Amino acid sequence: MLPHFLSSARTKTPIDVLALNMAYGLDFVSAFTFGTAQGTNFILDVHARNYWFGIYLKAFPSDYMFWLLYMPGLRKWARRIGVIIGPDWIDEARRNLEHWTLQIVDNTEQALRKRPLGDMPDGDVPIVYNQLKLAHAKERYAKGVDPTLSPPAEERLQIASECLDHLIATRDVFGIAYTFVVYEISRHQEAQQKLHKELKSLSKSLKLPLGPNTSDLPTAGELESLPLLNAMIKESLRLRGTLPTPNPRVTPLDKLTTIGPYKNIPRGTRISSFAWCLHRNERVFPDCENWRPERWLGEFGDLGEQERWFWTFGSGSRMCVGDSLAIEMIRYAVAFIFTNFHTSIVVSEDFGKDRQWVTGKSDEKLVLRFDEIHVEEA
C-alpha cells in the first residue's frame, strides 16, 4: 500500500484510496487466517481484486439484503411456487464466493499436511484456520471421536464458513471505516499538521524507507500512547461506525425483558441497537454531527460519559471479536501514512455523497493527493 502512495506522490498523480484500503484489510486478515502463502494479494493483483469485489457485490446486493438476511427461508419457499425474490445471479455469485473460499481452505489444509507448523516461516502460519481446526478437534475428542482422524465434510464447510465471515466483515467494516479515518484527517488540514508533529515525537520513526527488522518499528504500545492519533481514529469511527445497520437481537424466551426505559418487552421480540443513533446523542456528544477529536482528549464534553456511549464495536459477549486487530491495523496504517505524506482531497463527491453510506460500490471513490514529507520537514 505504501509504495502505491509513494508512487502517487512522486508522479504527482492523485489516487483513489477506497478500493486500495479494502484490499489492505483483506490481504492482512486473509494472511492472518490462512498464512501469507495462501492469503490474497489484492493490493498488487488488481485483476483478482476486481474479480472478488465483483462477485461480492453480486452476492450481497443492497436492494435484496433484507430478504437475504432476515427471510432466506421465505425466499426459498417463494421460489417453489414461482415467486422470485431476487435474480438468479445472486445465488450464482454466492456459489462462486463459497467455491473460492473452499479452494483456499483446501490449499491451506494441504500446506499443513506437507509442512508442520513448527517448520513454517512465521508469516506462513495459518493462525485462525489452525485455531478453528483445534477447536473442532477438541469437540470430536469430547464426543469420543479420535481427533487425529480426517475431519468430516461438514466440519470443512463450517471452518470455511467461519473464515469467509472474517473476510466479509473485513471488506464491509474495516476497509470502509479505515477510509473514513483517512478522509476526515485529509479534510481537516490544521488537525493533520498537528498529527504530523505528534508522529515526529516517536522514538522509532516510521519514515520510509524502512529497515529490514521489525524491531526498528514503534511498538503497538507506543502508538497507543499517542493521544491525538487515537483521538482522531476514535472520532472518525464515532461519526462513521463499522456497520450501516442495527445490531439485531432476540429477547429471552423464558421471561419479559427491560432495557432502559422500555419495560416488559415480550418474549422472543426482535430488538436492535443502532450505533449511528447512540453516537449522535447531543447530550452526550455536544456538536455531535461535527468531527471534534478533542472530545476524546477531555477538552470537549464529559469524556467518561462519551466513552460509555462509544459503541463502534458493540459490547458484551456478542461484540466484534476483531476489534483489537482492527484498531491496530488502522493505527499503524494511519501512522505510516501521516509520517510520510501530507494528504488532501481531490475528489470526494462520490464518497458518502448526500450523507449516505459508503458500501464500496465501483462508482464510489475517494481520490486523494499525496505529497511526500521530506526529512528536512519532518
Image: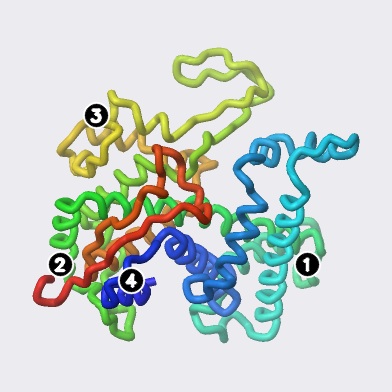
Q: Which residue is the site of mark 1?
A: 151
Amino acid type, label 4:
Phe
Tell me which label, 4 or 1, sits earlier in the chain: 4
Q: Image height check: is 104 above or below 307? A: below
Mark 3 vs mark 1, foreground winner is 3
Q: Looking at the rendered structure, which numbered label has been put on residue 249?
A: none
Q: CA distance from mark 3 to mark 4?
A: 36 Å
Residues tagged 3 and 1 counted as in contact (Cβ below 8 A)? no
Tell me what residue is drawn at x 16 percent, y 60 percent. 198
267 left or right of 347 in image: right
Amino acid type, label 3:
Pro
Residues tagged 2 and 1 counted as in contact (Cβ below 8 A)? no
Mark 2 vs mark 4, foreground winner is 4
Residues tagged 2 and 4 counted as in contact (Cβ below 8 A)? no
Q: CA distance from mark 2 to mark 4?
A: 19 Å
Q: CA distance from mark 2 to mark 3?
A: 31 Å
Q: Which residue is the site of mark 3?
A: 286
Q: CA distance from mark 2 to mark 1?
A: 51 Å
